[in-house]
Image (cartoon, rainbow, N blue to C red):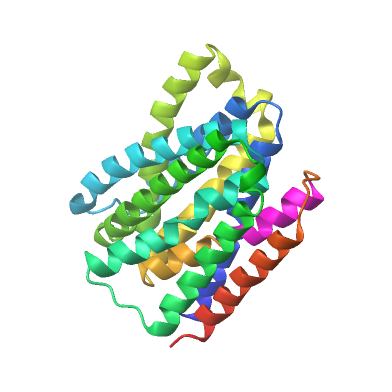
Amino acid sequence: MSPGVFLAVLLAALLHAGWNAVVKGGDDKLAGMAGMAIGHAVPGLLAVALLPAPAPASWPWIALGVLLHFGYQCFLLVAYRLGDLSQVYPLARGSAPLIVAAVSVGALGATLSGAEWLAVGLIAAGILGVGLARAGRANPRAVWAALGTGGFIAAYSLADGTGARLSGSPVAFFGWIAVLGAVPFAIFTEWRRPGLVLRLPVRVPAAFWGGGWASFAAYAIVVWAFTEAPLALVTALRETSIVFAVLIGAVVLRERVETARIAAVLVTLGGVAAMRLAR
């Protein structure tokens, strides 16, 4: 992975942790998630209008991506209702790098060096460790919802990475997912709370404008990076957003950070260092 791609994915990790904090930190979780999920259609429309259209071969992957992102958003919403940011977020993200690495190597023909496997393993272990530090005292339903979210993360990462490589225009590829994906979540939101969708820009401006744009920018960077580096490495490095999430949870949301979580963050940072030094 080149230094430019490495730094870009770290920026995406920071943005990703930021919009998760916006959703979790708000009093109305449904409105916050809807604001983000529907709000990122605005930059998505700009990408669709200004960039070359994705190649026809990538359109089935766009359709699959829309379904998987919707499932992810629904599971994440449930998880955030049941647990706190610094518990749910790492459990949701920690298993994805290992799943993506196993599938991309076993089924998609990717290759990873021993040092890269070590980096992916350390990052995944550190992320899971952050969440498991309090899992014994957590609501079991929050743990299972977070792990289900992790399954969707791995699935959409593999689908989006494959589709982006076929598209010839990765940011526009994700632009279409963002635009089309806003439709089912808008329908879901209206079903849950009629009239909320039209009020989102005023009801939750931070989530709609800030979270929506941050979410789009974060994942657009990742989708582009999928075309520049192995899927497993990009996925693992993106999940270092846990470091930022723990800091935001402690400083902004006033969540408790135990010594075990600090140790897990250090393991994650060790994985980042190993990835940068690999190859």
Residue drawn at the location 38% of the way across and 54% of the way down: 157
Quadrant of residue 171 within the rendered picture: bottom left
Which picture quadrant has residue 129? bottom right
Looking at the picture, how far across and down is residue 196, in whole percent?
57, 17
Judged left or right of residue 216, residue 180 is left
Residue at position x 46%, y 32% in the image: 74
Q: Which quarter shows the C terminus?
A: bottom left
Foreground residue among 56 and 154 = 154
Residue 195 or residue 252, whichever sits in front: 252
Q: Which residues are magenta?
A: 242-252
Can residue 5 be spotted in the picture? Answer: no
Residue 130 in the image, given as x and y percentages of width and height: 63, 57
Q: Tell me where residue 163 appears, x and y as whole percent.
A: 28, 55
> Based on the displayed image, in which of its 4 quarters is residue 164 positioned?
bottom left
Residue 74 seen anywhere in this rendered image of the structure: yes
| Residue placed furthest toward the top | 194
On whether residue 46 falls in the magenta region, the answer is: no
Identify the residue at image location x=70%, y=32%: 26
Residue 231 horizontal side relative to residue 138, left or right:
left
| Label tally | 0
Q: Which residue occupies the foreground of this view, 151 or 223?
A: 151
Residue at the far left in the pictured view: 57
Position of residue 150 measured from the top left corner of the image (x, y, whole percent): 45, 48
- Asked if the magenta segment contains residue 246, the reply would be yes
Please state, as top left, top right, bottom left or bottom right, where the N terminus lies in the image. Answer: bottom left
Q: Main secondary structure of the magenta part?
A: helix
Q: Residue at x 60, y 69 (%)?
A: 268
Q: Is residue 57 above or below residue 271?
A: above
